[in-house]
Image: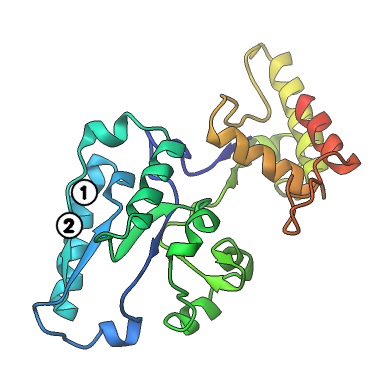
Amino acid sequence: MNIHRSARSPRQNPLPFIILLLVCNVSSCRRPVPASVTVTFLGAWWLQPDELPSAGREFQEFTRKTGIAILDPPVPETLFSSLDPPAQLDLLRRVLEEGGPSPDVLGIDVIWPATLADDLIDLRPYFARELSLQDPELVSSYTVDGKVVAVPYHTHVGVLAYRTDLLRQYGYSHPPQTWDELESMAARIQAGERAKGRKDFWGYVWQGAATEGLTCNALEWQVAEGGGHIIEEDETISVDNPAAIRAWQRAAR
């Protein structure tokens, strides 16, 4: 059994990113507008090379349906490839705060809304229906002081990939439903397979390198155990609690 999730590393797949500063709502964007209307979009650095053609087609389809042209200014590859995410965020803050021409639509990381909120408009009036159909927990990630400053474009969700043949072989009629079940079932299957000579067999694997993927997995373990979110909404530090400790002890096993 192993965890399979969308890659978190920006060098493998684009991070979940969100669209900000939209200048029209969905209903009004369906109506043709004068061809002189142009929207500047800044966010292509999240895209991988093989995704650029499909993004270009999406831009063209949007323009065909709405009459709104999309200006996608090129971002020098050397500029963003040499900057880590904090430096990219700092650059975007300067772009928004300097008072000059700024993008109409901005693609950012899912963890940046609060940092950029002062320079972003409230999208709730424009996306009321769409937001009502979203998971409230998802929308809360983009809400700052009651203002929805972003909407999800790509949302990556972690899933558990498992071997149905091994589950049947070891007498299990269903995949694990809890971390306790996962731990006991994976340990039993691992011991059984290693006894057959597969000394390198692991019952449970995850993204263990020191990357964003490991952080995401670790937070999922912690939250699932009731260990909180490290820093809560009221800005209290909650991570030093028995449930979080229990999560790390399980991870160590």
Circle 2 packing at 10 Å, graded few (<14), some (14-19), many (20+), is few
Residue 208 coordinates in the image, percent (x, y)? 60, 26
Query: Which of these two is toward me, 227 or 73?
Result: 73
What residue is pinned by disc 2?
56
Direction from residue 99 to residue 203 in the image, left or right: right
Q: Nearer the viewer, residue 95 or 77?
A: 95
- Which quadrant is the N terminus positioned in? top right
Q: Residue at x 79, y 51 (%)?
A: 236
Residue type at tag 2 = Gly
Q: Position of residue 37 (x, y in %)?
A: 15, 76
Q: Is residue 101 left or right of residue 64?
A: right
Q: Is residue 182 above or below residue 72?
A: above
Q: Position of residue 21 (x, y in %)?
A: 36, 68
Numbered badge on residue 240: none
Q: Helix, strand or loop at disc 1? A: helix
Give, as a three-letter code, the residue at label 1.
Leu
Label pair 2/1, CB-CB below 8 angstroms: yes
Residue holding disc 1 = 52
Q: Determine the CA span between mark 2 and mark 1.
A: 6 Å
241 on left or right of 80: right
Residue 110: tell me if it is visible.
yes
- Residue in view at x 32 percent, y 28 percent: 82
Image quadrant in which you'd find residue 243: top right
**Looking at the image, residue 77 lies above or below residue 224:** above
Compared to residue 232, the image places residue 215 above or below, namely above
Quarter occupied by the C terminus: top right
Q: Image quadrant of residue 135?
A: bottom right
Task: Tell me the residue at 24%/61% (across/down).
Answer: 101
Q: Quadrant of residue 219?
A: top right
